[in-house]
């Protein structure tokens, strides 16, 4: 890591943080994207890309990026229009766009490979342009999980490490071209447990939040075996960390028991709070400043019946910051919480949307909600309960109504995990010009 490169990275963060104070909040097609992204979709998405785990004996057995037509005006609406296999099975998981939105980065938690796809030229046919396999050697981290766009950079959160495959890990910074720039260990002092999972940034407050999960030894273990192992169940993260964004240094560690996963900042102008869900304790946690302007994390709500371990796995906040979708894996339920008062979220709707559900993404206008099924290859349910799908719903504020479904098992595609939206280039350029 050269010091001039690192200084340049930090200076770019300073500039972006300052600009964010006076700029209008970025609007995202999916409400969980980085605030640094450009070319955002504010209307109808054209495609949904699904990062899919290969299954032995199914199709070509390979991990792949599956592209589905999501525009209701298209002749191929609701159908798979492209599938790009990357070879092998390495526990594919999450994806993230670069700040210019031309590339989509996607990672595998087992072999730690990172795949970079060109989705800018023709999003209906993504092209694999680079494979990065040096993250463990460069950083000592394994399990690239979250891909978060920075100015000309990609910030990658690891889940584990090369030394003992436990939960201690860190974040790696790459240029948009895929060159390694810097690494940052998760804190292990002042309450830090060294675990990592998600990243969420509030540039105006010079604040980055990270959450925590577990290491390779746990996430690659069969779920039944894991739950029956008391020692393994102790090896989950119980913290969130507030970072000084410009300095890339931990500022404060919050005690948040039970593996806090996805983090979502409110996108409503003037709001400066974030929310997360803890998987093992089934709680909602709010991060905001107290009367003395000090950042605090506190439990504000309960998801389902914690004694039944519904396992909240993904959340999606509405564009106005007034609502939150929560998917719980074990009971296959999608819930909606009213966040009008973020200090006291209230569940106002629920629907069983599958025998197992994982990721949930909504369009910026809030009219469409997409759900996928797979959590981890060794954690998914068995037999008839092992549904694998992408399901699209219309939301009118009262009810989720089915739009279309792709059965990934029937189509011999694999296990449907993370998803991202794109629009056709010409329309995308027009949308970007309006921002």
Image (tube, rainbow, N blue to C red):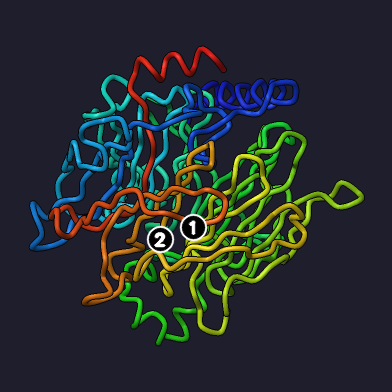
Under tag 1, what secondary structure? strand
The location of residue 254, given as percent across then percent down, is: 70, 60
How far is disc 1 from disc 2 in space, using C-alphas? 6 Å
- Taking 8 as reference, is 414 left or right? left
> Along the line of sight, which residue is nearer the eye, 418 or 211?
418
Among the 4 quarters of the image, the one containing residue 229: bottom left
Dots 1, 2 in contact, CB < 8 A: yes
- In depth, the one of 364 and 184 nearer the eye is 364
Image location of residue 381, percent across then percent down = 30, 74
Q: Is residue 333 above or below residue 16?
A: below
Q: Is residue 230 above or below residue 336?
A: below
Horizontal side, residue 291 vs residue 136: left or right: right
Residue 428 coordinates in the image, percent (x, y): 41, 20
- The residue at which mark 2 appears reads as 358
| Residue at (59% x, 24% y) in the render | 7
Indicate the secondary structure of the residue bearing disc 2.
loop
Q: Is residue 126 visible?
A: no
Q: Is residue 425 above or below residue 252?
A: above
Q: Residue at 42% of width from left, 26% of height from top?
A: 101
Residue 61 occupies which quadrant of the picture? bottom left
Which of the 4 image quadrants contains residue 243?
top right
- Residue 314 image label: 1
Which quarter of the rendering shows the C terminus? top right
Evaluate whether residue 348 shows in this view: yes
Instruction: Say few, some or many: other residues with alpha carbon within 10 Å of mark 1 (under 14 / 14 to 19 / 20 or more).
Output: many
Residue 386 location (% of width, % of height): 26, 70
């Amino acid at each position: 890591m050269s010091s001039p490169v690192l200084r340049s990275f930090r200076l770019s963060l300073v500039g972006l943080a300052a600009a964010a104070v006076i700029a209008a909040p970025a609007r995202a097609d999916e409400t969980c994207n980085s605030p640094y992204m450009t070319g955002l979709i504010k209307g109808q998405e054209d495609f949904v890309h699904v990062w899919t785990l290969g299954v032995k004996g199914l199709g070509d057995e390979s991990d792949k990026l599956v592209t589905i037509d999501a525009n209701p005006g298209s002749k191929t609406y609701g159908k798979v229009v492209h599938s790009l296999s990357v070879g092998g099975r390495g526990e594919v998981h999450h994806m993230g766009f670069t700040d210019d939105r031309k590339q989509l980065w996607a990672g595998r938690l087992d072999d730690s490979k990172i795949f970079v796809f060109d989705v800018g030229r023709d999003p209906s046919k993504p092209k694999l342009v680079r494979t990065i396999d040096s993250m463990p050697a460069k950083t000592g981290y394994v399990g690239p999980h979250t891909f978060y766009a920075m100015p000309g950079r990609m910030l990658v959160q690891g889940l584990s490490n090369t030394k003992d495959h436990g939960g201690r890990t860190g974040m790696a910074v790459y240029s948009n071209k895929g060159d390694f720039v810097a690494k940052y260990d998760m804190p292990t002092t002042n309450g830090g447990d060294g675990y990592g999972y998600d990243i969420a940034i509030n540039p105006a407050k010079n604040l980055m939040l990270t959450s925590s999960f577990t290491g390779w030894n746990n996430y690659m273990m069969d779920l039944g075996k894991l739950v029956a192992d008391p020692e393994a169940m102790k090896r989950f993260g119980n913290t969130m960390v507030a970072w000084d964004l410009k300095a890339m240094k931990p500022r404060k560690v919050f005690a948040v028991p039970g593996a806090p996963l996805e983090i979502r900042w409110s996108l409503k102008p003037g709001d400066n709070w974030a929310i997360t869900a803890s998987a093992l304790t089934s709680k909602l946690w709010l991060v905001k400043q107290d009367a003395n302007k000090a950042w605090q994390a506190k439990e504000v709500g309960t998801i389902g019946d914690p004694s039944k371990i519904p396992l909240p796995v993904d959340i999606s906040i509405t564009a106005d910051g007034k609502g939150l979708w929560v998917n719980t894996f074990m009971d296959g339920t999608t819930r909606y919480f009213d966040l009008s008062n973020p200090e006291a979220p209230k569940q106002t709707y629920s629907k069983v949307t599958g025998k197992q559900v994982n990721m949930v993404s909504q369009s910026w206008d809030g009219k469409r909600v997409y759900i996928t099924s797979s959590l981890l290859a060794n954690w998914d349910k068995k037999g008839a309960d092992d549904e694998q799908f992408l399901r699209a719903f219309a939301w009118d504020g009262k009810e989720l109504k089915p739009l279309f479904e792709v059965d990934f098992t029937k189509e011999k595609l694999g296990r449907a995990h993370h998803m991202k939206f794109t629009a056709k280039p010409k329309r995308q350029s027009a949308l970007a010009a309006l921002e």
